[in-house]
Image (tube, helix red, strand yellow):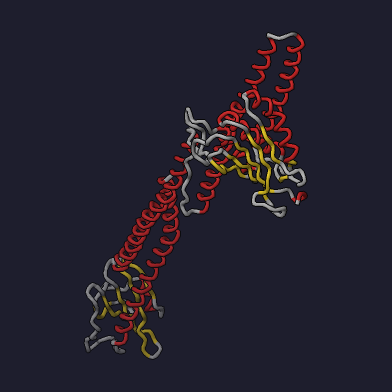
Amino acid sequence: MQHRIVRLALVVTAVALVVLGLPLAIAAGGLLRADEVARLERTALLGAGQVNSALGRGDALELPRVPAGVQLGVYDADGARVAGAGPARADAATTAALAGHTTDDVVGGRTVVAVPVRDAEQVIGASRAAGAPGAVARRTALAVGAILAVAALALVVAWLVARRAARRLSGPVGALAAVAKAHADGDLRSRAELSGIAELDEVALGMNASAAAVAEALTRERAFADEASHQLRTPLTRVRWGLEEAIDGDPEQLRSAAAAAVRDIADLDHSVRDLLDLTRSAPAAGSTDMTDELRGTAERWTGPLAARGRRLLLEIDHDRSWRIAMPVEAVRHVLQVLVENAEQHGSGAVTVRLRDAIGGESDDVVAVDVLDEGEFVGSWPVPGPPEPGQPHGIGLLMAQRLAAQARGRVVLSARRPTTVTLFAPRATDAR
């Protein structure tokens, strides 16, 4: 890329120099010859002013001094040189001057100017001035040499400027290529730096945005795989236990267990589809009646907790409206995570409490506390997937993310007893 930019700049500069320099060189040559002709004409006129009517017969003509290499001569009407230097007989320019015309010509590399000498309106002779041999050619060559020197300097400057511009352009382009290669190799954390060149900055911003979008999509897919397996493990285990216990019982008990398993698996299928939608995109707008949702949570978890010798308690003020501005799918999965976390890692009774975030009917935020009698172990907020052996992690991480996507928050209100709280905005129709 650098070589192409430099080469293009040099070609454009060279074409511009030829287009401008060639007419300039031709014009300079013409001006220099015109200047030489004017100078010789003045010299010839000075010589004509020194001529008397007798053309020096009987009295030698005293012609003015001329620069070295310049010839000045006077010719009579017959074309014979009577004074000064020059050819013995009149040449073509001098003959034209004897005819009454001021004439210039180039003879043997000399510029020649001849003017008529008049007496009483009669041409009685001619004054001829000839420049030094090759004088105009030398001066023209110097002028053309100066033009060529300036052109060469212009090419050097163009080369330096183009090289610098090429480096300034190729550097950011190379950096963009390196970032693109890093993205292709799977490093989506690599970001393109802004260079100050508007067009390249637009490309860099587009690359960064696309990399962020791809990274987010991959994160969502990986999170779904982890979270779905985590969320399915406990329900599937319960289904398995129920079927295994029913196998040893009577056929009616097995039939009942199979029917319950079918219902549980259907619920799991629905939950997985909801979780997939929530994980891959932001939850749609919606509202949830928390009173009904907590009753459904109690129905789902009372049995599993009782099997462990524990209780599930609900604390709800039924005289209040507890509708929140969060979609029911997100609320259901968040509560699933919080209660399951209390079942798996807590101890004692599990209490689900529905309350105003601060207190009073005018509050705009509803709080749902899920607490048990154990002590929370680990860091909060949950930074990411847990290390092996860590009691809390994927589930709470998912709950935090789902709540945040639905304009809510999941926070650790107390470590002992473990209290995790979902804060959600109250629906406008519940105020």
* Residue situated in front as seen by the camera: 294 or 171: 294
Nearest the camera: 41 or 147? 147
From this view, report whether residue 266 is shown above or below residue 95: above
**Side of 365 where 104 appears, left or right:** left
Residue displayed at 52% across by 38% down? 382
244 and 302: which one is in front? 302
Q: Is residue 94 visible?
A: no
Residue for point 43% across, 52% down: 9
Task: Establish if 12 lies above or below 122.
Answer: above
Can I make out residue 345 in this image? Answer: yes
Which quadrant of the figure has residue 288?
top right
The x, y position of residue 184, in whole percent, is 50, 34
**Horizontal and vertical percent position of residue 341:** 59, 32
Residue 219 position by quadrant: top right
Left or right for 260, reference 16: right
Q: Report how many numbered discs are placed on residues in the image.
A: 0
Relative to 411, say whether 390 is above or below.
Answer: above
Pinpoint residue 145: horizontal percent, then vertical percent: 32, 61
Q: Residue at x 36, y 80 (%)?
A: 115
Residue most extreme to the bottom: 120
Query: Measured from the top left, where is residue 250 in percent x and y?
Result: 74, 8
* Image position of 352 with respect to 149: above or below: above
Q: Quadrant of the N terminus?
A: top left
* Residue 213, quarter of picture: top right
Name which residue lies at 36% across and 73% down: 93
